[in-house]
């Protein structure tokens, strides 16, 4: 029999479990002191764990003076063990929450650990700033709101694994240390100690491995996998992230899409109580860019964009002639039907500032009433041009051509115009409450271009990755007109976010070699980077395709937050650093030497009194 001192009593229940039916039971609870109320003759403590809170009553007549003095010394976040009897609370005594009908009359108390005063407030209005919360993430994670999100993430993970397991998908782990093939974002590199001067890369995706699994006979693969990208961060991106990775042999869009739609519908039904209408609508990349200015359209409201260059061919207004003189210029507009007084001059000036932030000269707007328009739109457009523009938007958005509204026009480079108007459209949707919060609109975007032109390097880059198959009939464009080639690629989007993307892959080695040539790789370079894949494809490869979904982003939507850090236990900042552990950090010189790396001086370190030879870069 153990003679070790008792450091806590083993709990019989958690703090979210007890109900009125447990009245008079003898129980043991453990947890943190969440809140305390000293009424003089009696002391009340809310005891908290991740399951909930239970009120504990400390009565000196029951506890005795010695233990009651311990109870009076309790402070927030002290860890305690309590033994006592469940008392039912009725009428005005009953509290809120699942355990509000009961309280524990404490008969024994053990103070397990003390806590210093917390540097951040866990609940209430006095929330700490984000940097402080990330520095003390271990405390921030005690917040019940964050705990609910972490629990939801766990359950989404389990539900996803179960869904694909029931459909015969195999969970196969792929390597974390792999070969660098930087065709997309920058790789995180790992130096090899046993191979001097050579490096592994952390995977941006298990792409090549899951394709090889298809030709190895594992016809259905699924993995929830960590991936890494050394790229500039955004609010919804992290340097390390988790994706639901899927691949199927003998796959097509008509095979994959229903499988994915059923999974998504199940998640939204189970975790949001929302029924997702299937089949999910599909639209081409070209239509998405034309009507929404972005390849991940937010279709919660019907406001669409339209190119109007063809309607203004004879217009010699300075903004239009300047746009037409550009190699890739366009004139595009947005029409907001309805009461024109909803947008004041101050609001429209704010929209103009927003548009200018994308490198455009400004926003040509006009309040359209009757047959005329005010502002720059009225100045530059003839009555006939205005009528034709209104007619186009009436057909596009489904309103009457005579309806009043505000017309907004941008002219300039196509990319800048699309970027500006897509952002402006979302801003107007929010400002005018054109959609209901809590609604979800899904759409498949298909038929992406095979390649994008890289102006800096004057070559074609793969829009997705170089293993994406061209659409049937488009393979002949790989050599003659790569910019016109469309791919069998697709994204699933929701509320303006890309949830996941994928493609039907190239399964023919000669076709794969041609795709490599189209992005400027010589046969020798392709052999050096992807020779193992080309050889593998030559041993009988079935047609195959798949997708990858951002698990973090899916949980973010399901949890009802717009911050991806809320659904990741230990996230990085936008500068890819961990404020809690202070990673990344310098390393000792012997470690670098062991890895065959040579330190380089970094400007500024010496001035701060730090050893400038311990940067860790070689």
Image (cartoon, helix red, strand yellow):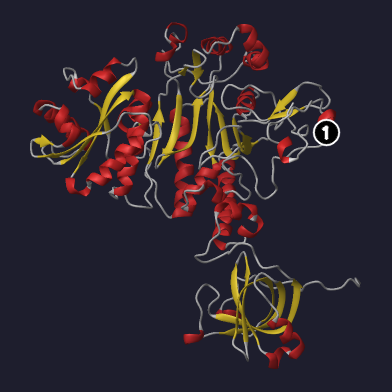
Q: Nearer the viewer, residue 209 or 106?
A: 106
Which secondary structure, mark 1? Answer: helix
**Which picture quadrant has residue 534?**
top right
Q: Nearer the viewer, residue 608 or 293?
A: 608
Q: Position of residue 476 (x, y in %)?
A: 44, 8
Q: Nearer the viewer, residue 448 or 408?
A: 408
Q: Position of residue 385 (x, y in %)?
A: 13, 26
Vertical comparison of 608 with 38: above or below: above
Q: Residue furthest front?
A: 607
The structure residue drawn at horizontal position 14% and vertical position 41%, both measured from the top left corner, is 404
CA neighbours of label 1 inside 10 A, class few (<14), some (14 to 19), many (20+): some
Q: Position of residue 320 (x, y in %)?
A: 23, 22
Q: Quadrant of the C terminus?
A: top right
Tell whether 256 sits left or right of 588.
left
Q: Position of residue 230 (x, y in %)?
A: 61, 32
> Do we see residue 301 in this rendering?
no
Q: Nearer the viewer, residue 472 or 430?
A: 430
Instruction: Read off the residue under disc 1.
Output: 589
**Which picture quadrant has residue 118?**
bottom right
Tell whether 280 sits left or right of 48.
left
> Do we see residue 272 in this rendering?
yes
The structure residue drawn at horizontal position 21% and vertical position 49%, both measured from the top left corner, is 342
């Amino acid at each position: 029999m153990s003679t070790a001192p008792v450091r806590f009593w083993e709990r019989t229940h958690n703090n979210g479990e007890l109900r009125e039916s447990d009245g008079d039971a003898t129980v043991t609870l453990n947890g943190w002191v969440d809140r305390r109320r000293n009424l003089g003759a009696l002391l009340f403590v809310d005891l908290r764990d991740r399951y909930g809170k239970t009120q504990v009553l400390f009565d000196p007549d029951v506890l005795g003076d010695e233990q009651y003095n311990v109870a009076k010394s309790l402070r927030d976040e002290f860890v305690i063990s309590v033994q006592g009897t469940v008392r039912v609370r009725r009428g005005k005594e009953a509290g809120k929450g699942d355990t509000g009908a009961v309280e524990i009359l404490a008969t024994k108390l053990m103070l397990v650990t003390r806590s210093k005063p917390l540097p951040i407030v866990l609940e209430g209005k006095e929330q700490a700033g984000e940097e402080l919360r990330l520095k003390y993430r271990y405390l921030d994670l005690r917040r019940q709101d964050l705990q609910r999100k972490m629990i939801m993430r766990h359950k989404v993970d389990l539900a996803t694994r179960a869904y694909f397991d029931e459909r015969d998908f195999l969970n196969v782990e792929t390597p974390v240390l792999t070969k660098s093939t930087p065709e997309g974002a920058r790789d995180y590199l790992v130096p090899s100690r046993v191979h001097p001067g050579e490096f592994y890369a952390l995977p941006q995706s298990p792409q090549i491995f899951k394709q090889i699994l298809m030709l190895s006979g594992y016809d259905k693969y699924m993995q929830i996998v960590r991936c890494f990208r050394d790229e500039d961060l955004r609010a919804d991106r992290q340097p390390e992230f988790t994706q639901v990775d899927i691949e199927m042999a003998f796959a097509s869009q008509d095979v994959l899409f229903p499988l994915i739609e059923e999974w998504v519908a199940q998640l939204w039904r189970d975790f949001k109580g929302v029924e997702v209408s299937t089949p999910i609508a599909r639209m081409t990349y070209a239509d998405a860019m034309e009507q929404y200015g972005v390849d991940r359209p937010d279709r919660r409201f019907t406001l669409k964009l339209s190119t109007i260059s063809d309607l203004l061919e004879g217009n010699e207004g300075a903004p239009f002639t300047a746009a037409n003189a550009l190699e890739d210029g366009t004139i595009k507009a947005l029409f907001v039907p309805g009461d024109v007084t909803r947008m004041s001059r101050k609001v429209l000036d704010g929209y103009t500032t927003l548009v200018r932030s994308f490198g455009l000269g400004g926003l040509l707007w006009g309040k359209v009433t009757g047959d005329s328009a005010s502002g720059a739109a009225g100045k530059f457009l003839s009555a006939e041009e205005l009528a034709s523009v209104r007619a186009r938007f009436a057909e596009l958005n489904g309103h009457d051509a005579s309806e009043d509204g505000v017309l907004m026009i941008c002219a300039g480079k196509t990319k800048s115009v699309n970027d500006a108007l897509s952002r402006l459209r979302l801003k107007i949707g929010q400002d005018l409450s054109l959609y209901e919060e809590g609604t979800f609109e899904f759409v498949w975007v298909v038929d992406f271009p095979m390649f994008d032109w890289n102006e800096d390097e004057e070559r074609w880059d793969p829009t997705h990755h170089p293993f994406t198959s061209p659409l049937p009939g488009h393979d002949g464009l790989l050599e003659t007109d790569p910019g016109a080639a469309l791919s069998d690629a697709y994204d699933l989007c929701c509320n303006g976010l890309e949830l996941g993307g994928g493609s039907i892959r190239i399964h023919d080695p000669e076709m794969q070699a041609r795709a490599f040539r189209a992005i400027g790789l010589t046969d020798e370079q392709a052999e050096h980077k992807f020779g193992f894949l080309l050889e593998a494809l030559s041993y009988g490869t079935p047609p195959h395709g798949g997708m990858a979904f951002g698990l973090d982003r899916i949980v973010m939507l399901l949890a009802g937050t717009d911050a991806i850090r809320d659904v990741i236990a230990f996230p990085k900042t936008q500068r890819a650093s961990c404020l809690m552990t202070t990673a990344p950090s310098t390393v000792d010189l012997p470690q670098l030497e062991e890895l065959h790396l040579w330190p380089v001086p970094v400007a500024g370190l010496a001035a701060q009194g730090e050893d400038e030879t311990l940067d860790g870069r070689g």
